[in-house]
Amino acid sequence: RVTRAPHTERIASLLSSGQIKVAVLPKATAYALFTGAEPFSAYGPVELYVLANQRDFLLVARADFPDHHAYQVAATLQAHAGSSGFTLLSEATTQPPLHPGVAAFLQGAAMPAAPVLADDEALEDGEQAHHH
């Protein structure tokens, strides 16, 4: 699901409530949301991890964003580094911290196992379950 929010407070609300799992935020905004600083004290602190960097912005994910997915995001961004504008950061340089799935990718570890979703999590927008 892609959402375009009119202001950062709305993005903070969506992230803190779990309505979205990933967002591109200005670095200062990501740090303020992560620490629960103003103007996000009503939402935070929100446990966030960094997936990637783009100049003054961070691609961040909630703590419940699966390691498997973060690993795949890192692999895709690395493969398209020239065109995406995003770069992967080493663990020592990020605040919020680097997502464990991205760290695994950077360390050359095997891809973490895919999460097992409950039927209601796997279905969106009226899709029908297909049982065989």
Image (tube, rainbow, N blue to C red):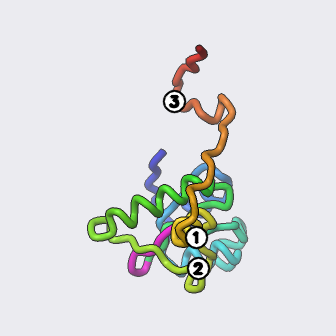
Q: Residues within 10 Å of mark 3 (few under 14, many from 20)?
A: few
Q: Identify the disc placed on residue 52.
A: none
Question: Where is mark 1, residue-wise?
Answer: 103
Residue 2 in percent (x, y) is at 45, 49
What is the spatial separation of the Cα atoms under label 3 and label 1, in whole angstroms? 33 Å
- Give the alpha-carbon distance from disc 1 to disc 2, as whole Å: 7 Å
Residue 125 badge: 3
- Image vertical order of residue 66 relative to residue 25, above or below: above
Residue 65 in which image quadrant: bottom right
Q: Position of residue 115 (x, y in %)?
A: 64, 44
* First in residue order: circle 3 vs circle 2: 2
Please state which of the two labelled residues, at mark 3 or mark 1, is closer to the viewer: 1
- Residue 54 belongs to the span the image colors magenta: yes
- Which region shows up in magenta? 50-56
Left-right relation of 100 to 25? right
Question: What residue appears at the point 57 percent right and 64 percent down from the top-left corner?
Answer: 109
Q: Secondary structure at mark 1?
A: helix
Nearer-N-terminus badge (1/2): 2
- Alpha carbons under labels 3 and 2: distance apart: 36 Å
Q: Residue at x 39, y 80 (%)?
A: 55
The residue positioned 70% from the left and 65% from the top of the image is 43
- Residue position for label 2: 91
The residue shown at (63%, 76%) is: 97
